[in-house]
Image (spheres, grey):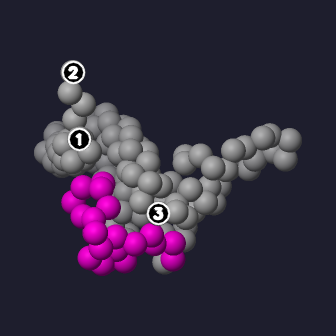
């Protein structure tokens, strides 16, 4: 059996993400929980902030920005700006915008799509991180000190042995 190359897998991951984002917008918007006016406003603000994070994160990559999770020839390891707080600010912004939008619609169907999007983006980020670690010598150290999506680090007990060379 032939193993698909990275470009095929990268395109499939992007296609899956695109399908889920389209579904998030087009599936029915009601039928789950009631949405008070304040939540609608907060949802709009969260969606806007999330999209702003996507824009800032993408702009910071410059010519290194690609549609797929494969670094192109212009890619550089970014560890400043939003990348100082999380390894994948574009995905973080996308997840914030999607979660805020979903909560503001009160749709259980959209909530299911959101969960699938979280799973897909987690899988996509892990897949991408393997390629980034191969491409950039400092990536493993950066990944060890920088969270993937949410800019908080869980408390680790001092007696727990952690292998910082792994990409999480």
Left or right position of 15 against 136: left
The residue identified by callout 1 is: 5
State the residue at coordinates (30%, 54%): 69
Residue 51, by quadrant, is bottom left
The Cα–Cα distance between marks 3 and 1, rounded to whole angstroms, is 20 Å
- Is residue 92 visible in the rendered image? The answer is no
Q: Is residue 116 above or below residue 126?
A: above
Q: Main secondary structure of the magenta part?
A: loop
State the residue at coordinates (28%, 38%): 113
- Percent x, y for residue 110? 27, 40
The residue identified by callout 3 is: 136
Q: Is residue 115 above or below residue 61?
A: above
- Is residue 156 visible in the rendered image? The answer is yes
Q: Which image quadrant: the N terminus?
A: top left
Nearest to the observer: residue 41 or residue 48 = 48
- Percent x, y for residue 45? 36, 67
| Mark 2 and mark 3 residues within 8 Å of each other at the beta carbon | no
Which region is colored magenta?
59-80
The residue identified by callout 2 is: 1
State the residue at coordinates (21%, 48%): 7
Q: Is residue 6 above or below residue 58?
A: above
Q: Secondary structure at mark 3?
A: loop
Residue density around tag 1, few if under 14, some if 14–19, many if 20 or more, within 10 Å:
few
| Mark 3 and mark 1 residues within 8 Å of each other at the beta carbon | no
Residue 56, by quadrant, is bottom left
- Percent x, y for residue 60? 37, 77
The Cα–Cα distance between marks 1 and 2, rounded to whole angstroms, is 13 Å
């Amino acid at each position: 059996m032939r193993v698909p190359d990275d470009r095929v897998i990268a395109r499939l991951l992007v296609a899956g993400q695109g399908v889920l984002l389209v579904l998030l917008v087009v599936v029915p918007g009601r039928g789950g929980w009631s949405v008070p006016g304040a939540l609608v406003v907060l949802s709009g603000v969260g969606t806007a902030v999330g999209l702003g994070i996507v824009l800032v994160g993408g702009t910071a990559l410059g010519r290194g920005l690609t549609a797929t999770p494969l670094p192109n020839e212009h890619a550089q390891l970014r560890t400043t700006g939003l990348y100082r707080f999380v390894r994948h600010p574009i995905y973080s912004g996308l997840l914030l915008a999607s979660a805020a939008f979903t909560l503001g619609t009160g749709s259980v169907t959209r909530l299911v799509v959101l969960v699938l999007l979280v799973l897909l983006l987690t899988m996509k980020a892990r897949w991408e991180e393997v390629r980034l670690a191969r491409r950039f010598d400092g990536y493993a150290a950066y990944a060890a000190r920088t969270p993937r999506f949410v800019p908080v680090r869980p408390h680790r007990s001092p007696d727990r042995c952690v292998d910082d060379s792994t990409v999480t």
